[in-house]
Image (cartoon, rainbow, N blue to C red):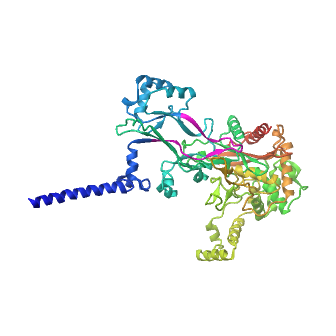
Amino acid sequence: MIKRISIAACFISLIMVVYIGRLAWIQLMPGSTSAAVLSPLANRGGGGWQRLSVQQRQRNLVLDTGRGDFYDRYGKSITGETYSAIALFPVRADLRGQEEDLSELSRLLGVTKEQLQQKWDAVREPVFWKADGVQAPLRLTNDQITRLKKLQLNGIRVLPYRNRYLPDFEAKHLIGFTSQHPEWLQANHAEELINGKRKLVDQVGGSGLEKSLDKMLHGVGATSVSYFLDGRNAPMHGLDMRITQPGNRYYPLKAMTTIDLQLQNEIEAYVDAQGLKEGAIVVLDASNADIVAMVSRPQLKPGQFLSSDGSEWANHAIKAVAPGSVFKLVAEAAALEAGVVNQHETFFCNGEYGKYGLSCWKEGGHGRLTLQEGLAQSCNIVFATLAERLQAKELKRTADLLGIGQQAGWHRDEGFGPFTTPLRLLEEEERGQLFAPVTSKLVRDSGGEKGEHEQEKDKHSAKRSGKSDAAQKAREEAVMFAGVDGGVLAQSALGQRDVRMSPLQAANLIVTLLNEGRVMEPRLVSEIRYANGQRMVKLPAQRAQAIRGRIKPATAHALLRGMQAVVDHGTGRSIRQGLWAVAGKSGTAETTQAGIARNHQWFAGYGPVKSPRYAVAVLVENKPPGSSHQATKLFRGVMDIAARHSK
């Protein structure tokens, strides 16, 4: 008998040890095994059983993600507003309230009581009430708020909702968009996920400034409301709601942009009314290259991508395409800088160049004309002649001095202030280009590239001596120039063949000429401030960091006079009349789209002529050959908008 009792006691003790061990596991480990398997990052950090027990009796709703907002140069909000909205919590149907109150709620929401009940029954987690087909929660009026507060209903509350995009906000490529991207978060912010600073469902920047400043804009946490329910989804009276928010009064941050929001919106409305389907317009401050407006079409429609990569909604203002005759500004600058022409030389154009299949756009030619008139009339014969007098390295050197062939936008190659890594405000910007890029294979086949072991030795040697890899660059240029003959130079001078430039780079070229050859870096953000308005970091206007040297001021002045002649009596004379006297250069580049001949139309210039305020570049893409020059007309319209805006 004693033996049986002892065996039973041991068995019971073993069972109790197992239960005690299980209880210790639940209390001490960060989360359940199954949850850890499903999401190991989400369940690390402690407090597993406490967190799970709380989750059983409360429902959370995010009111404000804590993401920083954008403002224009005058402090006007581009993103971010707070308004009152209705929140629904998953309360059982029989505990929601009286029928008359439910009927009144349905009338306030503009739905039938049956529709209200159906939507409410489907709620599993707290949600804001949204009208069918509308992304943002319903915006309540003061009258609706007053009437709602009189209702004796469980599971509904009037709460402040932080809306990222304003009602009249049209998505802008320069701002970009946010989206959920859990794979990217796991790859780039694993530590923050582990520490609970980020969640896999967080919105992250997908393009534009939302992407380049994502790390700072993310903030320090969301503001949420907790509504307490028991295990049967019945309200726990007495607990009601609890607001949880970050305890840091310096967040969310404010990104102060260089954009003039009113001017931006007016230009967007104008180009849409004019039927711009594909292209871009860039407006820069003529004094420092700050980006005042940047419009791209097709319009950005977040979440509505037709292709797998969303390429049809790319920012065309920073895409590099053939610039056509706008590039003649660079060719003339190179000829003047190299001393192969003077401003008083005359040329003769009979309409045919006589080689390379080149001819002038004007049938029969322009006759005898000066260098300035050659630019005013955009004579192909004049510029093909200039190009063949140049060496490839002379044309490239001038293009480099003017900022062509690189990304133009503001950047820092090293961390500064709160930025611990390099920063580029326009991450998606494409580099410009003069000649076809040189591949490693071409350099290797030329016999100019060393083996990997020798290259590594050279790198270490250069590092020790403080020298750059200028020799490698020289080898690459030698290979590049070896394939550039007179025909390539002539076609390149006309802005065709391998030449590429973005509207941002074209507008910055005009700013460079207005500033006597000083190349600036167009800036989109001037500073970042704390929530209380105190400055966190300044992003100063700055000259292009990679460019050493500049063209002569006399060269810049000659080109500016030539652009004035373009509008006064040249190819741009159709826009001579307007609120401001303007100057500029038109261009047409031949291209193809799906195998069909098309033209890119350009106009880049400045105004007003006597005291320039803005440099503007307009690109209209893929127009049928023979179409009227829409880019020139749009340039005039944008300048008139700017003139009215400046009064």
- Total numbered badges shown on the rendered structure: 0
Q: Residue at x 80, y 53 (%)?
A: 329
Q: Quadrant of the C terminus?
A: top right
Q: Is residue 444 magenta?
A: no
Q: Quadrant of residue 228?
A: top left
Residue 511 position in % (x across, y down): 78, 51
Residue 343 position in % (x across, y down): 89, 56
Q: Is residue 203 left or right of residue 273?
A: left
Residue 407 position in % (x across, y down): 68, 56
Chain part drawn in magenta: 60-84
Q: Quadrant of residue 306?
A: top right
Q: Is any part of residue 594 visible from this angle?
A: no
Q: Quadrant of the N terminus?
A: bottom left
Q: Is residue 32 left or right of residue 608?
A: left
The one of 577 and 19 positioned closer to us in this rendering: 19
Residue sticking out furthest to the left: 1
In this view, 358 is above or below 160: below
Q: Residue at x 31, y 54 (%)?
A: 23
In this view, 295 is above or below 399: above
Q: Quadrant of residue 402?
A: bottom right
Q: Is any part of residue 75 visible from this angle?
A: yes
The one of 198 and 570 positioned closer to us in this rendering: 198
